[in-house]
């Protein structure tokens, strides 16, 4: 009897333990562990950032273990400010925005080129009297900013040929509307607005002025860069894959769909001019230095930062 009693007590204890374990396993919540690095991209939407949207939509960032949040803003300066303030980590912008900010002490570094050449060009009416660079003297020309690389390049050509034009700060749709209304003599536009204007019958002048200028850079906050360099390198690999896909067929249905989804631009205009966007990741160092020299001339910055523009973590990856 003693042996049986002992067995009974042991069995009871084991049963109680199993019951407790069972209850514990039912009430304990499974841990949700994510191995993806989250990167917030501040973005002023344009087809010039199509590689960002393509990498996101085709799952390329996820492929490299990244979770990307794209925060929309109205302009390049706003995306820069979100990154500087720590509300975002990365932004695409005109190179002059990044160069001026870094030269003036902002905690940013350029990690990649987006594309080259600059595809912003002067657009005029079919009967425009402007035919030579010298004809620009005294003309009212719409453009996004005096420090825009396309505005800079055209202004240099105008000055070299006898005079400067008067810049009216306009971009995109408002610039085309001003041209249609005869309020300006020409406008400096980027894609897809160049194609929109061309499809309306307007003509392009002096495309060679910007043919050697690097356009758009990818820029990161230095604090985020220092602690997440490997993740940002994977980020650029995803962008490179997106570049290859776009360049293989810039007007493929899926690519056009992505561009329309993110930018709202007309599909017809995207198909008309998307092949002009030559995406890349290697930095055009000499071209960026030349832009910095022009910003010095304009007194926008005091000196050319040269290699201090670039992230050391990306040396030999996107620059030498």
Image: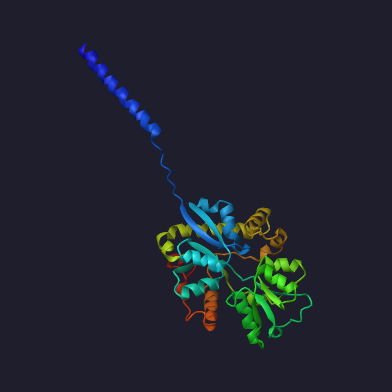
**Which x, y percent locates residue 20?**
33, 28
Q: Residue at x 52, y 69 (%)?
A: 283
Q: Residue at x 66, y 68 (%)?
A: 172
Q: Residue at x 34, y 26 (%)?
A: 19
Q: Residue furthest top?
A: 1
**Which x, y percent locates residue 143?**
64, 75
Q: Relative to 130, is 11 above or below?
A: above
**Which x, y percent locates residue 18?**
33, 26
**Which x, y percent locates residue 241?**
56, 57
Foreground: 110 or 167? 167
- The quarter of the rendered structure image containing the N terminus is top left
Foreground: 84 or 198? 84
Foreground: 214 or 84? 84
Q: Relative to 38, is 128 above or below?
A: below
- Relative placement, left or right, of 34 versus 269 is left
- Relative placement, left or right, of 284 versus 264 is left
Q: Quadrant of residue 275?
A: bottom right
Q: Residue furthest right?
A: 127
Is residue 172 visible from the viewing direction of this image? yes
Q: Relative to 238, is 98 above or below?
A: below
């Amino acid at each position: 009897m003693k042996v049986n009693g002992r067995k009974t007590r042991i069995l009871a204890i084991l049963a109680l333990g199993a019951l407790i374990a069972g209850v514990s396993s039912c009430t304990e919540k499974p841990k949700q562990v994510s191995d993806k690095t989250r990167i917030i991209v501040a973005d002023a939407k344009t087809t010039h950032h199509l590689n960002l949207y393509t990498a996101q939509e085709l799952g390329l960032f996820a492929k490299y273990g990244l979770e990307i949040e794209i925060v929309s803003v109205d302009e390049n300066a706003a995306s820069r400010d979100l990154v500087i303030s720590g509300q975002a980590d990365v932004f695409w912008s005109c190179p002059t925005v990044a160069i001026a900010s870094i030269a003036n002490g902002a905690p940013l570094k350029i990690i990649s080129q987006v594309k080259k050449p600059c595809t912003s060009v002067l657009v005029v009416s079919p009967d425009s009297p402007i035919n030579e660079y010298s004809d620009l003297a005294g003309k009212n020309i719409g453009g996004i900013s005096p420090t825009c690389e396309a505005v800079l390049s055209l202004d240099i050509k105008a000055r070299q040929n006898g005079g400067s034009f008067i810049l009216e700060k306009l971009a995109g749709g408002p610039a085309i509307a001003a041209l249609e209304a005869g309020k300006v003599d020409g406008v400096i536009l980027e894609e897809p607005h160049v194609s929109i204007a061309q499809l309306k019958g307007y003509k392009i002048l002096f495309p060679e002025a910007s043919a050697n200028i690097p356009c758009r850079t990818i820029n990161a906050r230095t604090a985020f860069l220092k602690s997440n360099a490997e993740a940002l390198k994977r980020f650029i690999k995803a962008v490179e894959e997106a570049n290859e896909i776009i360049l293989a067929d810039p007007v493929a249905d899926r690519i056009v769909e992505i561009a329309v989804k993110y930018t709202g631009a007309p599909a017809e205009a995207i198909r008309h001019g998307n092949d002009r966007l030559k995406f890349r990741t290697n930095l055009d160092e000499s071209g960026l230095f030349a832009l910095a020299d022009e910003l010095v001339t304009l007194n926008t910055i005091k000196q050319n930062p040269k290699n201090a523009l670039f992230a050391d973590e990306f040396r030999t990856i996107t620059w030498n």
